[in-house]
Image (cartoon, rainbow, N blue to C red):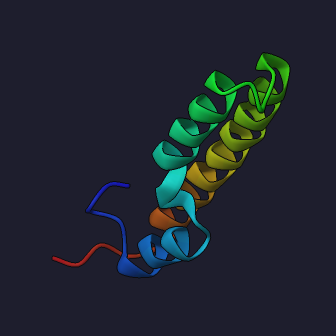
Amino acid sequence: MPAELPVELLLTGIARGRGSAEMMLELLGILHDKGVLTEAEVRRVVNVLAADMSEFNLELRQGHQSVPLKG
């Protein structure tokens, strides 16, 4: 998440677990490699994760535009 965003928005993202996407993708890869998850199951989780990240990105952009810039 960009550092120029207000701290409240960054903390909200962290609290919602948005900072752990890379770890989630790594875990999905490991579970797929071990045969625990099929490729379709991994794709399903990745699609949900991507949609959630897109939604939160939109929230950040909307929130960032409504916060006055400090000079």
Judge by depth and name the residue closer to the eye, 67 or 27. Answer: 27
Q: Position of residue 53 (x, y in %)?
A: 62, 47
Q: Residue at x 77, y 18 (%)?
A: 39
Residue furthest top as drawn: 39
Judge by depth and name the residue closer to the eye, 5 or 31. Answer: 31
Q: How many numbered marks does the figure carry?
A: 0
Q: Residue at x 50, y 56 (%)?
A: 20
Residue 48, image quadrant: top right
**Vertical order, 46 against 15 (above or below):** above
Q: Residue at x 68, y 26 (%)?
A: 32
**Vertical order, 38 against 49 (above or below):** above
Judge by depth and name the residue closer to the eye, 3 or 15. Answer: 15
**Vertical order, 12 against 57 (above or below):** below
Residue furthest left as drawn: 71
Q: Is residue 49 left or right of residue 21?
A: right
The N terminus lies in quadrant: bottom left
The C terminus lies in quadrant: bottom left
Q: Is residue 46 left or right of residue 17?
A: right
Q: Is residue 45 left or right of residue 56?
A: right
Residue 62, image quadrant: bottom right
Judge by depth and name the residue closer to the eye, 5 or 37. Answer: 37
Q: Position of residue 29 (x, y in %)?
A: 58, 29
Residue furthest front as drawn: 34
Q: Position of residue 3 (x, y in %)?
A: 26, 62
